[in-house]
Image: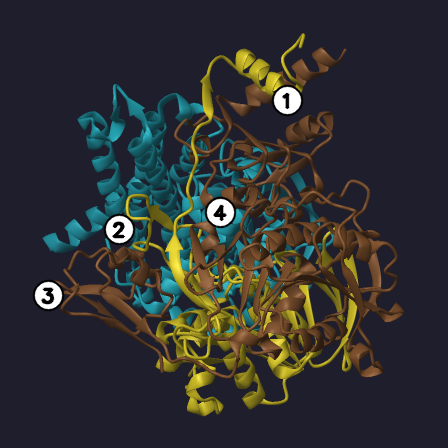
Chain colours: A cyan, B yellow, C brown
């Protein structure tokens, strides 16, 4: 479907397609096997101005030129994900890490941290998840205790994307243990701060080019001015951050699905069995038709949500959740079907689709599991119904 | 430092196919691209501009649609562009082409280096670069695989020849033709793409460059194409289908002679 | 100004010209071919029309008294203390062309110390050798070489000047042609005399090797051409051949050069010039990775050969550019060329089709390479090549 993107958004798409062709596709299998972060490709992206597309011009970015930044992020992430979901998330996770600063940071904080993120000279990561706090974000146990004009952080964050590669982390920690979720606060912690170290690097099923690591805080002293907004505001910052960046994950899922669909369609047009190309068999045709329709529907949901956000809409929690849950489920289905269509070849590492299937799975899990997404959607619906009933 | 890069819009000849029956090229679906060798020349020019300061101007001689490759070059980082276009330029061989490009460089004035790719992937002659140098009466360094140094007076470059590499020093101004070994061309940046869309590209015709009809285009070309054919493929090879072991044996027979003979 | 015309009375609207245009400039309007501004007058459509409906007209240029020019001049090249083999090939070709009208074949030699070389050039076909000898001519440098040769051409008026399409030839000849306002055709693979005009028909690959273009230089002289090495054949040398030697007088101005050769760095141990190899084992897209080229290296070593590659492998970064065989890489003519996982697209083919013997291994039996190889083997190179290596080692014991 032609979405009649603006020239500027098309520039992003073209640029990402070029990066994919020249830099990502040749190495994606290797990075997957070696569990290796694509440092060289990150540099290419930075040199091409990709990192600033969601950051306002005031802080060194170019978001205004792209209509706000959400569509831009989705277009970029989707295009890169067609080639490799792991490399794409290494790009997109920076927006996630920067989002707390963007949404709720003070002007000084924005001036201090955003320009480097916009230029790509520094990378960011968002640190919420812990071993006991996944879907239950309120279960965060990392503590931040006020001491003079700083806070002392103690605790361990788990499964942080860009962990070990980023220089700037937005960390959610407990400042008031008596208030549950309302006792959380958000902090900006820079790599190299004494008491902040990295733990193990995870060995994942998919998106293996993405660096996923533990962050360990041991009496880590963070200046008070690094707190975002104020004490107790951390949960809201986290939720707003996830709501706004969620379309990006949905875009990643759409991209992975599209990449798999393209491979399957191409293979079906070449593979001959029983004297015919297999795309002349209705069984295959129907599979491809369903795959294509679902990917298109997922894309439409993602783009509509992104447009909403760019247009200034304040409440988009439900739509954001819908886009993510639908697109990720589609990605899992489409990649699985792609492997099926490639048959035995699809199961071999020599062909790219088994990796796509492994990459797709995480999109149903992170940035809020699909079960949580459904709860969110249901809650919103219930509220709307109640409001209508009055 | 003022560097001019002469580029060409070419059909992507790696995508070109032949209509075997008619012996003609199949043009449909073959995109027009910036000549790949010129990308390397452009990158080299920008590299040295970034280091020494100055400007990079891209020029091309072609029909109006050739403007697209100039905009592509600006998106990659060229500072300005000029399109040399005139009905009279059509049909030019390398003599007329290099003459026209050289006159444009003269008109610009104050140019220190002209860089161009080793060859265009449609003509494949590799003659235009030296032709420009001759027209300008500048020294030339061809087959440059690496530029080691550029300063106010000289350029020092590695010229890749048969059996090795010559280290050449030349005075400036100079024309150099560049190989793919020289660098890795950068991608266009988003900023660049935006600039490329908005930038005004002047078009210079025959009179703008003080040329006359017998110096340009087909009339100014001492050579002419009189025939185009497709190469004949002689297919009489024996194709073997067998298990890998047997195939390997046959290959070694072909290489070393049959065992026992 | 030159013009192109579709003759309305002759055009039948068959549309054969449309796909022939490399620039997409032709369309059919009411059964008549129409050519738009994208036309570059390359002449492809003129050739494609079986009805002669497309005509390109140019104005005749004057200024050259064609009849005053005769003879075939070959620019000799030296390398590694020897006359380069390509020079001998050119002399052989010049002799064949000269048979048509008894033209004189001359060779031009610019060098530091000529030694036995004039005699060698004579025995390979030169009737006369023009020699410039000076310490400043030890290395090829564009300006002195072009100046000296230009002066000689103006004086001796050869009808044809040939040089090998080496880095030297391709540097020197365009400069001379431009200065003498005459035509130059690059990288010719075939030269013949047109019986109608007596002019030289110069045939060469273009468009990445997808087509062969025949080019003429009708109105100016000399007709200049660089010729692809390893395509033409030498004559059998005859030490008894008689030839003349004429020294070129040099003045200091002739030798002025704004370029200097500071140093020559020969290829390092392990770096090869694949054009010298007798056996080339070449890999393409089918190799799939950098590591897999080690397999080809092992086979090449066993056969005392070199490793080549198609553009796909180079672009993927699996092996460096000096190994590239093809239109934008090197042209090779080894005794044996073993193509592994190479589809055989034309851009690659033109770089290796003159190999004495081509063996191809590819698991896709519809790959174009099987259409022109001498022996093809349909199968997985990753299974076959290790077995080939094993078998070679076994037989050699």
Viewport quadrant of the C terminus of chain C? top right
Q: Is residue C340 left or right of residue A298?
A: right
Disc sitting over residue C312 in the figure: none
Residue B16 lies, in percent from the top left, at 38, 51
Residue behind mark 2: A301
Nearest to N terminus: mark 3 or mark 4: 3
**Label 3, label 2: how far apart the Cα atoms are:** 47 Å
**Label 4, label 1: how far apart the Cα atoms are:** 26 Å
**Label 1, label 3: how far apart the Cα atoms are:** 60 Å
Check if mark 2 and mark 1 are on a common chain: no
**Residue drawn at 38 percent across, 66 percent down:** C42
Disc sitting over residue C347 in the figure: 4
- Mark 4: secondary structure: helix
Please count the marks in the image.
Answer: 4
Q: On what subunit does the disc labeled 2 rest? A: A
**Label 3, label 4: how far apart the Cα atoms are:** 37 Å
**Residue drawn at 36 percent across, 77 percent down:** C58
Disc sitting over residue C30 in the figure: 3
Q: Residues within 10 Å of mark 3 (few under 14, many from 20)?
A: few
Residue in the foreground of this view, choosing between A133 and A12: A12
Disc 3 and disc 2 in contact, CB within 8 angstroms: no
**Residue drawn at 29 percent across, 60 percent down:** A315
**Residue drawn at 78 percent across, 67 percent down:** B168
Q: On screen, C205 above or below B83?
A: above
Q: Residues within 10 Å of mark 1 (few under 14, many from 20)?
A: some
- Mark 2: secondary structure: helix
């Amino acid at each position: 479907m032609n979405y009649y993107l603006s020239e500027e958004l098309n520039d992003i798409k073209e640029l990402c397609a070029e990066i994919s062709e020249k830099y990502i596709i040749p190495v994606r299998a290797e990075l997957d096997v070696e569990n290796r972060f694509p440092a060289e490709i990150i540099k290419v992206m930075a040199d091409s101005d990709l990192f600033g597309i969601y950051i306002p011009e005031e802080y060194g970015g170019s978001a205004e030129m792209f209509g706000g930044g959400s569509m831009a992020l989705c277009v970029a992430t989707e295009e890169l994900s067609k080639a490799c979901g792991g490399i794409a998330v290494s790009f997109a996770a920076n927006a996630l890490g920067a989002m707390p600063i963007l949404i709720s940071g003070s002007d000084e904080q924005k001036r201090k941290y955003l320009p480097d993120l916009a230029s790509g000279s520094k990378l960011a990561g968002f640190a919420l998840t812990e071993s006991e706090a996944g879907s239950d974000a309120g279960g965060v146990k990392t503590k931040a205790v006020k001491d003079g004009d700083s806070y002392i952080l103690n605790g361990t964050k788990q499964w942080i994307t860009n962990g070990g590669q980023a220089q700037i982390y937005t960390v959610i920690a407990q400042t008031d243990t008596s208030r549950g979720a309302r006792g959380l606060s958000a902090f900006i912690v820079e790599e190299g701060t004494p008491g902040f170290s990295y733990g193990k690097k995870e060995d994942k099923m998919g998106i293996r080019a993405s660096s996923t690591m533990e962050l360990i805080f041991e009496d880590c002293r963070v200046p008070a001015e690094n707190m975002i907004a104020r004490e107790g505001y951390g949960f809201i910052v986290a939720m707003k951050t996830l709501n706004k960046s969620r379309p990006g994950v949905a875009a990643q899922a759409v991209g992975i699905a599209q990449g798999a669909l393209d491979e399957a369609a191409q293979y079906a047009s070449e593979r001959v069995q029983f004297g015919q190309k297999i795309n002349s068999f209705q069984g295959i045709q129907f599979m491809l038709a369903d795959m294509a329709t679902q990917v298109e529907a997922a894309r439409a949901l993602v783009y509509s949500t992104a447009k909403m956000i760019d247009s200034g809409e304040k409440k988009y929690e439900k739509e954001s959740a819908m886009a993510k849950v639908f697109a990720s489920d589609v990605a899992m289905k489409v990649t699985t079907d792609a492997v099926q269509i490639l048959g035995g070849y699809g199961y071999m590492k020599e062909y790219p689709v088994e990796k796509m299937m492994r990459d797709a799975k995480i999109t149903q899990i992170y940035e809020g599991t699909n079960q949580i997404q459904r709860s969110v959607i249901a809650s919103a619906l219930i509220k709307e119904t109640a409001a209508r009933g009055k | 430092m003022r560097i001019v890069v002469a580029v060409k819009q070419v059909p992507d000849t790696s995508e070109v196919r032949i209509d075997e029956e008619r012996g003609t090229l199949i043009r449909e679906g073959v995109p027009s691209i910036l000549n790949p060798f010129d990308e390397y020349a452009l990158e080299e020019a920008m590299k040295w501009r970034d280091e020494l300061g100055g400007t990079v101007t891209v020029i091309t001689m072609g029909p109006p649609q050739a403007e697209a490759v100039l905009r592509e070059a600006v998106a990659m980082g060229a500072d300005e562009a000029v399109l040399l276009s005139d009905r009279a330029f059509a049909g030019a061989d390398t003599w007329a082409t290099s003459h026209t490009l050289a006159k444009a460089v003269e008109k610009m004035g104050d140019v220190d280096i002209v860089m161009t790719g080793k060859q265009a992937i449609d003509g494949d002659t590799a003659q235009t670069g030296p032709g420009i140098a001759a027209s300008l009466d500048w020294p030339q360094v061809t087959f440059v695989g690496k530029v080691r140094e550029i300063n106010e007076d000289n350029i020092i470059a590695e010229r890749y020849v048969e059996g090795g590499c010559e280290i050449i020093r030349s005075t400036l101004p100079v024309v150099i033709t560049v190989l793919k070994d020289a660098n890795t061309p950068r991608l266009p940046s988003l900023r660049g793409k935006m600039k490329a869309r908005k930038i005004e590209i002047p078009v210079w015709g025959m009179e703008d460059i003080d040329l006359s009809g017998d110096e340009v285009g087909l009339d100014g070309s001492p050579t002419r194409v009189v025939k185009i054919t497709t190469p004949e493929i002689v297919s009489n090879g024996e194709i073997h289908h067998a298990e890998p072991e047997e195939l390997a044996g046959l290959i070694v027979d072909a290489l070393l002679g049959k065992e026992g003979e | 100004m030159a013009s192109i015309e579709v003759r309305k009375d002759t055009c039948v609207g068959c549309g054969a010209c449309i796909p022939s245009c490399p620039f997409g400039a032709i369309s059919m309007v009411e059964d008549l071919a129409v050519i738009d501004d994208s036309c570059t007058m390359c002449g492809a459509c003129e050739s494609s029309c079986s009805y002669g409906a497309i005509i390109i007209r140019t104005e005749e240029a004057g200024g050259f008294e064609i009849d005053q020019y005769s003879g075939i001049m070959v620019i000799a090249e030296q390398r590694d203390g020897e006359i380069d083999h390509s020079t001998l090939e050119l002399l052989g070709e010049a002799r064949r062309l000269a048979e048509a009208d008894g033209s004189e074949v001359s060779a031009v030699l610019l060098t530091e110390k000529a030694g036995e070389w004039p005699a060698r050039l004579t025995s390979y076909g030169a009737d006369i050798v023009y020699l410039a000898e000076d310490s400043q001519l030890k290395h090829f440098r564009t300006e002195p070489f072009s100046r000296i040769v230009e002066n000689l051409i103006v004086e001796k008026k050869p009808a044809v000047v040939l040089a090998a399409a080496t880095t030297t030839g391709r540097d020197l000849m365009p400069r001379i042609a431009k200065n003498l306002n005459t035509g130059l055709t690059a990288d010719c693979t075939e030269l013949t005399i047109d019986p109608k005009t007596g002019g030289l028909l110069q045939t060469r690959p273009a468009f990445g090797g997808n087509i062969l273009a025949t080019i003429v230089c009708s109105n100016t002289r000399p007709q200049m051409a660089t010729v692809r090495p390893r395509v033409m054949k030498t004559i059998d040398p005859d030490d008894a051949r008689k030839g003349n030697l004429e020294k070129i007088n040099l003045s200091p101005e002739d030798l002025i050069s704004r370029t200097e050769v500071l140093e020559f760095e020969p290829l390092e141990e392990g770096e090869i010039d694949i054009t010298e190899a007798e056996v080339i084992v070449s890999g393409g897209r089918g190799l799939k990775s950098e590591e897999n080229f080690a397999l080809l290296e092992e086979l090449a070593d066993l056969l005392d050969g070199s490793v080549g590659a198609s553009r796909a492998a180079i672009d993927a970064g699996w092996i460096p550019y000096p190994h590239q065989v093809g239109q934008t890489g090197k042209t090779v003519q080894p005794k044996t060329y073993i193509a592994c996982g190479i589809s055989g697209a034309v851009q690659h083919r033109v770089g290796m089709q003159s190999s004495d013997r081509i063996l191809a291994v590819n698991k896709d039996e519809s790959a174009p390479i099987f259409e022109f190889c001498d022996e093809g083997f349909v199968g997985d190179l990753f299974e076959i090549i290790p077995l080939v290596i094993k078998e070679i080692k076994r037989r050699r014991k």
